[in-house]
């Protein structure tokens, strides 16, 4: 049973539907708004006693406690494997499926958000999120996991949501009308027209993470960048074996990562393009890389 499945029954009891919302400087060579192109590090976590009140997640017949901790001599606070601090329902998809976020790690620490799926037929990132739900989180990291912001696309085997919208062309920054419903880059009827986009944008604006990672397939690369963003991308690439190379082949307006870089103060937000398949070993490597770069 996966990490996400173990907590699936808790959504209705613990969900918190966020209010809807409506755009750090952009990275150098990530797909930029309004640009058209052709058609282990293993961390063993220990912790001091947690001084805050633990949160419980209620399932149908069980109660899952938050972090179980062990006292050590260092004044660190972290979770043990599978420790969950909170679970939130961010909103609902077009077809009514919940979009959830799961918090692990140190409340109030450095916020890191990982989104496994934005294109429904590119869902290998969900396996990485699953693994991140099991590994111990380094002290000082407030980790939020969003298994999927496009559950309808996953269920239907489509890139787009149930309205035929490419959610990675629907964010408010530099939005441009592209295509028609069902086209692979159809951008919707307007900026953040889709409930999935509204839910995730509102969540990110509220939490203000310092690092946001989205998973895609299957170009097998990470786009280059300068400064701290470039350092984090290069380190992630070194840990996972992905090359640093430009991403081309689309009309990049209303892109989620670009919106996050412009909207969230000081945030590093980038896309990891996985290959066509992802083994369990590779998912573990990527999850370990997330936890490593979260500390940079």
Image (cartoon, rainbow, N blue to C red):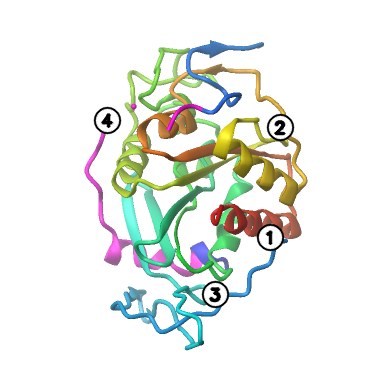
Tag of residue 284: 1
Residue at (74% x, 47% y) in the render: 238
Sooner in the amino-acid sequence: mark 2 or mark 4: 4
Query: Could you tell me how many numbered marks the image carries?
Result: 4
Tag of residue 180: none
Q: Which residues make up the magenta segment?
A: 5-26
- The answer to whether the residues at label 1 and label 2 have Cβ atoms under 8 Å apart is no
Residue at mark 4: 22
Q: Is residue 10 left or right of residue 235?
A: left
- The answer to whether the residues at label 3 and label 4 have Cβ atoms under 8 Å apart is no
Residue at mark 2: 219
Q: CA distance from mark 4 to mark 1?
A: 35 Å
Q: Is residue 29 left or right of residue 24?
A: right
Under circle 1, the secondary element is helix
Q: Classify 260 as above or below 246.
A: below
The reply to whether the magenta stretch includes residue 13 is yes
Residue at mark 3: 81
């Amino acid at each position: 049973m996966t990490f996400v499945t173990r907590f699936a029954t808790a959504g209705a009891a613990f969900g918190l539907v966020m209010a809807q919302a409506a755009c750090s400087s952009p990275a150098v060579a990530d797909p930029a708004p309004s640009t058209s192109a052709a058609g282990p590090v293993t961390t063993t976590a220990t912790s001091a006693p947690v001084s805050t009140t633990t949160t419980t997640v209620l399932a149908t017949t069980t109660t899952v406690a938050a972090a179980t901790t062990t006292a050590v001599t260092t004044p660190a606070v972290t979770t043990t494997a599978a420790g969950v601090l909170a679970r939130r329902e961010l909103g609902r998809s077009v077809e009514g499926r919940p979009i959830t976020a799961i918090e692990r790690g140190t409340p109030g620490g450095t916020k890191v958000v990982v989104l496994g799926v934005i294109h429904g037929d590119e869902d290998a990132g969900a396996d990485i999120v699953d693994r991140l739900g099991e590994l111990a989180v380094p002290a000082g990291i407030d980790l939020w996991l969003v298994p999927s912001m496009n559950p309808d696309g996953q269920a239907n085997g489509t890139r787009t949501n149930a309205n035929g919208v490419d959610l990675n062309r629907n964010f408010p920054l530099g939005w441009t009308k592209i295509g028609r419903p069902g086209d692979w880059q159809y951008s919707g009827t307007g900026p953040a027209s889709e409930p999935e986009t509204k839910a995730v944008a509102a969540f990110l604006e509220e939490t203000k993470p310092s690092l946001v990672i989205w998973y895609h397939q299957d170009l097998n690369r990470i786009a280059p960048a300068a400064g701290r963003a470039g350092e984090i991308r290069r380190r992630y690439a070194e840990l996972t074996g992905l090359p640093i190379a430009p991403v081309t082949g689309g009309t990049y307006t209303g892109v989620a990562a670009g919106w996050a870089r412009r909207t969230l103060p000081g945030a590093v937000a980038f896309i990891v393009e996985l290959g066509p398949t992802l083994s369990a070993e590779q998912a573990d490597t990527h999850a370990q890389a997330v936890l490593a770069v979260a500390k940079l």
